Image (cartoon, grey):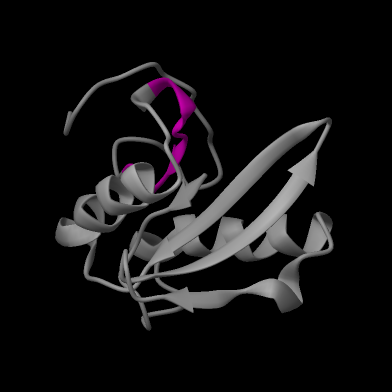
Amino acid sequence: VAGLGNYGLRGTRHSVGMEVLDRLARQLAVAEGWRVDKRCCADVALATAHGLELVLLKPRRFMNLNGLSVASAAEIYSLGPKDIYLIHDDLDKALGKVAIKLGGSAR
């Protein structure tokens, strides 16, 4: 589960993915487990939920480069596209609205 955004710019709508990951880590009781993984240039926490092993990922890059961290983490943790969930803002949606989609790109 990757929370996308601009690392270090907390409290901005563009970094909402990272805020969601922080909350998820607290709910899964791994908030103290964040560590820097230089191999993928991201903060990583490992968790288990409903029998699933999760890799929580907060890229340490600007939003337009988050994909590099996600791709590196996918290789490191042997994840395929179907295993990856991205959490990010969408200016076409009202603040607080959530949508789930399979695949896609900008727009």
Asked which quadrant contains residue 34, the reply is bottom right
Seen at 29% across and 36% down, the residue is: 92
Asked which quadrant contains residue 79, the reply is top left
Seen at 82% across and 31% down, the residue is: 51
Q: Measured along the vertical axis of the image, is residue 103 above or below residue 90? A: above
Most foreground residue, 60 or 12: 60
Q: Residue furthest bottom?
A: 8
Q: How many marks?
A: 0
Q: Measured along the vertical axis of the image, is residue 23 above or below residue 51? A: below
Seen at 37% across and 52% down, the residue is: 73
| Residue 61 among magenta residues | no
- Judge left or right: residue 94 versus residue 39: right
Q: Which residues are magenta?
A: 82-90
Provide residue 107's location: percent of width, then percent of height: 17, 28
| Residue 89 among magenta residues | yes
- Judge left or right: residue 17 versus residue 103: right
Seen at 59% across and 58% down, the residue is: 21
Q: Residue furthest top?
A: 102
Provide residue 59's location: percent of width, then percent of height: 36, 65
Q: Measured along the vertical axis of the image, is residue 40 above or below residue 77? A: below
Most foreground residue, 94 or 59: 59
Q: Measured along the vertical axis of the image, is residue 34 above or below residue 20? A: below
Provide residue 98's location: percent of width, then percent of height: 53, 33
- Judge left or right: residue 45 versus residue 92: right
Provide residue 95's location: percent of width, then percent of height: 48, 47
